[in-house]
Amino acid sequence: MRFITAPEIEIALDQKSLIEALRRAFRMGASARPYQAPLRNRFYIENVHADPTILLNMPSWQVDGDLGIKMVTVNTGNPAKGLPMVQGVYLFLDAGTGKVRGILEAEMITVKRTAAASALASSYLSRSDASRLLIVGAGALARHFIDAHRAVRPISDVLVWNRTPKRAEELVAKYRLQVDASVLNSIGVTDDLEAAVSGADIVTCITASSEPVIFGDWVREGTHVDLVGAFSPDSRESDDALVQKARIFVDTRTGALAEAGDLIIPMNKGLITEDDVAADLFDLTQGERDGRRFYEQITLFKNCGSAIEDLVAARLAYQRT
C-alpha cells in the first residue's frame, strides 16, 4: 500500500490527460461495466467555538475494477485560519478483493477533478473561440480552473474577482510566474464584477457564497457560465433570471437535482422544471444530447462534483506515481 501526497498528485494530473480520462469514464455510462456512484453522505458537525464542519463520504466503483472512497471535511472558516477549506483522504482499493492499494491526499484530487469536470463540460458548451475567462473567487480551486479552461479553449485573457481583493492579487501574481506570457496575453484583477461578467466569454464562479453572485442581467449572449461553489439545496451563486435565460447542464442529474440550490431554489418557485436540465456529462460525452446549439446561446453548467470523477483522478494519479 502506498501513500500519495498532494505534490505528487499535482505533478501526475495534468489537465489535458485528466479531462480525457473523465470523458472516457462518462462515456462508459452506457457500457456493460458503468461506473457506480451513489449520492454522497453528508453530516453537519456543530462546533461551539468555530464554524460548523461538513463531513462528506463519497464512494464510487466499477464492477471487476477499482473502488474508491473519499472522506473530506469542508469548513468555510478555515481559510481565515490559514487552513484549506477542504481536507481529507482518498482510499483507493481493488473492487474484486477489497484490498487497499493506496491512500491519497484528497484535497488535490478534489481540486484537480473539479476543474477538469468543468473544462470537460466547457468543451461541449462554451464557444470554440472563447478567449476571455473570468474567475470569480480566488480560493484553492482558482488556479486549477484557469489551467483547465486553457486546456480546452484558446484562453488569452483572464480576470479574477474576489470579495477580498488581496487574495485575487496574490493569485494573479503567482500565476504570472508559472505561465509563459506568449500563451496568455493578460491576467489581472478586477473590482467591477458586473462589467467583468458582461465582457467574459466564460464565467467560472467558485465562491463560498450562499446568495447569488452572478446575475442574469449581467450575462451577455454567447456566454458560458460555470457554477461550482454552492453544493447544498439552500445555497446558490446565480439568480433566477440567469437560470431562466440559459440552457442548463449538470455533471450528473441525480446529484444536481438532489443538491444544487442553483436549480432547486428556482424549481421550488415554479420558475424552471427538471425538464429544463438539457443534459448531464453522460449525455454530452455519449452524444445523446446537443451541447451549445448556436453562437449567441447562453449556457450554464452546474458542477456539483461526482465520486466518479474522484475515482478516475485517483486511478490516474496512482498509475503515474
Image (tube, grey):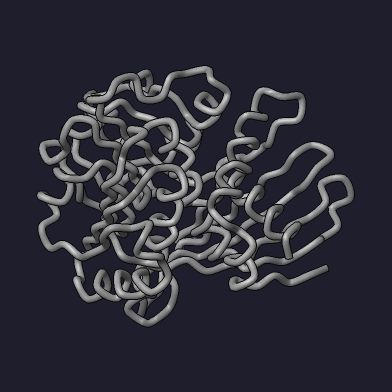
Quadrant assignment, res 262: top left
Residue 32, position in %: x, y? 76, 24
Residue occupying image coordinates x 51% and y 32%:
281
Q: From where the camera sits, is residue 28 visible?
A: yes
Which residue is depicted at the point 72% across and 24% down?
Answer: 31
Residue beneath the point at 80% across and 42% down:
65
**Residue 313 sits above or below residue 130 on the image:** below
Quadrant housing the N terminus: bottom right
* Residue 73 spot, x, y in % from top left: 50, 65
18 on left or right of 77: right
In front here: 96 or 156?
A: 156
In percent of width and height, residue 57 lies at 59, 55
From this view, report whether residue 297 is shown above or below residue 80. Answer: above
Residue farthest front in this picture: 182
Please state, as top left, top right, bottom left or bottom right, where the C terminus lies in the image.
bottom right
Foreground: 156 or 121?
156
Res 320 quadrant in image:
bottom right
Q: Which residue does the image show at 22% across and 25% down from the upper left?
A: 296
> Can residue 126 be spotted in the picture?
no
Q: Position of residue 8 (x, y in %)?
A: 64, 70
Most extreme residue toward the right is: 97
Count of marks placed on residues: 0
Q: Nearer the viewer, residue 170 or 71?
A: 170
Front position in the image: 320 or 128: 128
Give the left or right position of residue 49, taking residue 111 as reference. left
